[in-house]
Image (spheres, rainbow, N blue to C red):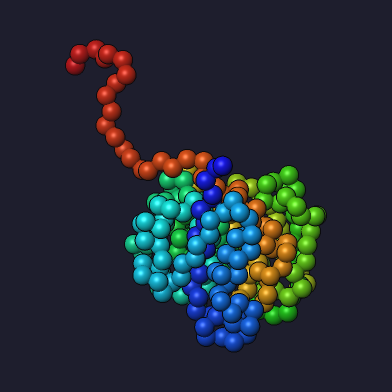
Amino acid sequence: MSAPLRITVWNEFRHERENPRVAAHYPHGIHETIAGFLRVDPGLAVRTATLDDPEHGLAPAVLDATDVLVWWGHQAHAEVGDAVVARVQARVLEGMGLVVLHSGHYAKIFKALMGTTCSLRWREAKDKERVWNVCPSHPIAQGLGDHFEIPVEEMYGEPFDIPAPDELVFISWFSGGEVFRSGATWRRGHGRIFYFRPGHETHPTYHQAEVQRVIANGVQWARPTIRRPDACPNVAPLEPLPPG
């Protein structure tokens, strides 16, 4: 039997403790809701970490034991320590997968890996979101139809200041008229990155089956194929070289 895929679900865990509307949907935190549906798969070993844990729950030993990191952040991006961001970035470049959700688009780690502002337009209202599957052959889109709808969600709109994705899997349309590149992938170093837009904290989005399917697929897609620490060695030639 192969070793389980090791997942760490990271969350600020601030909204749930401060806002009763959020706590009503996620009484144990968004991280535990996501971890809960991922744990249904016996091939996954899932742990959680939060902002207020020592080293944000992302000490070197934790990252060494993580194959894919799932990231949800919003109101406390600035509180994430730069040393931890650098540590996570290095681990992604070595081969760890990263799945960034919703307002994690503005997380320090996502900005560092994208190299852009990652800015967008937004509106917190009662928009309906229709998520279109524009790459049905992609592993992240497996088990989904041509589209699915989220009854009420926060709107994100273009322009979204990200590098051109390696693959665009989902595009969202909102009832206010906007569209958004809501599911996109990149490769950075040896690591795979998947950004997925839905998941505003005051809505029960992470309880929806289609959203759970996308995240579960994304975790599988982002699994490492190699772990190769950064090095710049001075090497001897394989064949004899002329003197001098």
**Position in image of residue 3 (x %, y %):** 52, 46
> What quarter of the picture does the C terminus occupy?
top left
244 or 202, nearer to the observer: 202
**In the rendered image, which quarter is residue 148 located in?**
bottom right
The reply to whether residue 139 is in sight is yes
Q: How many marks?
A: 0
Q: Is residue 73 above or below residue 186?
A: below
98 or 64, nearer to the observer: 64
Q: What residue occupies the far front of the structure in this picture? A: 1
Q: What residue occupies the far left of the structure in this picture? A: 244
What residue is shown at x 45% (from left), y 64% (from top)?
108
What residue is shown at x 69% (from left), y 58% (from top)?
213
> What quarter of the picture does the N terminus occupy?
top right
What residue is shown at x 41% (from left), y 41% (from top)?
228
Q: Is residue 16 above or below residue 45?
A: below
The reply to whether residue 187 is in sight is no
**Position in image of residue 113 (x %, y %):** 47, 54
What residue is shown at x 24% (from left), y 12% (from top)?
242
Q: Is residue 15 above or below residue 70?
A: below
**Position in image of residue 234 (x %, y %):** 26, 32
**Position in image of residue 36 (x %, y %):** 60, 66
On screen, residue 217 versus residue 190, left or right, reads right
